[in-house]
Amino acid sequence: QQPVQSPQAVILREGEDAVINCSSSKALYSVHWYRQKHGEAPVFLMILLKGGEQKGHEKISASFNEKKQQSSLYLTASQLSYSGTYFCGTQDTGANSKLTFGKGITLSVRP
Amino acid sequence: SQTIHQWPATLVQPVGSPLSLECTVEGTSNPNLYWYRQAAGRGLQLLFYSVGIGQISSEVPQNLSASRPQDRQFILSSKKLLLSDSGFYLCAWSLGNYNSPLHFGNGTRLTVT
């Protein structure tokens, strides 16, 4: 089942912070985050496994709340290069490893 | 290091014509391979995935098919294209475990006219 991402779109100025959410109705084993620039392929950002871990990559970090079946991506002090569409992909606790992606959130960072 | 090649980059085909998109991976063995489609303004829809040669799982019933004739080669085909087949097609690979990210090719922009 497709995870639900919110909000639908984000517009912010350079240096501002943003939070993007990803929710599932199923128990999850992992959550992946990807960013896609217009006309390009999605690029992997990070994976979070069940256990409620939090990860960070430069000024982008994420958390995974296993009980709430929800993950959040935090972008701090946003840069122009952060603009793009952010997708979360979820893997449930089944034996296969294929991802189910949300519809994506468009984030625009303006000068 | 691992690389993924996908071609062609763009394709314009008339309705009813056949389709063949190819994807190859280098630098790894027995990867999981995937075909995704991204329609304008929509998310990533998984079309097919393969965990080994000749093993294809279809996620969405449609007029597309996939084949994996070699370990690191994945082909997406259609005998007769429909207008609704237009979109951005992405091939991807992974190691197949929960810790493994997807690595996408550069995609093929298909326009069916």
Image: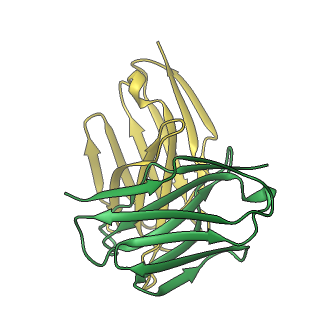
Chain colours: A yellow, B green
Position in image of residue B13 (x %, y %):
71, 53
The residue closer to the viewer here, B105 or B75, is B75
- Residue most toward the left? B1
- Quarter of the image with the N terminus of chain A in it: bottom right
Residue A31 falls in image quadrant:
bottom left
Q: How many marks?
A: 0
The residue closer to the viewer here, A10 or B16, is B16
Residue at left offset 27%, top offset 45%: A56
Position in image of residue B66 (x %, y %):
56, 76
Answer above or below: position of B50 versus A56.
below
Residue at left offset 24%, top offset 69%: B28
Residue at left offset 76%, top offset 68%: B80
Q: For this view, does B32 lie left or right of residue B36? A: left
- Residue most toward the top? A111
Position in image of residue B87 (x %, y %):
66, 51
Q: For this view, does A106 lie left or right of residue B23? A: right
Position in image of residue A106 (x %, y %):
57, 36
Q: Is residue A68 visible?
A: no
Q: Is residue B108 visible?
A: yes
Q: For this view, does A34 lie left or right of residue A102? A: left
Residue at left offset 33%, top offset 74%: B31
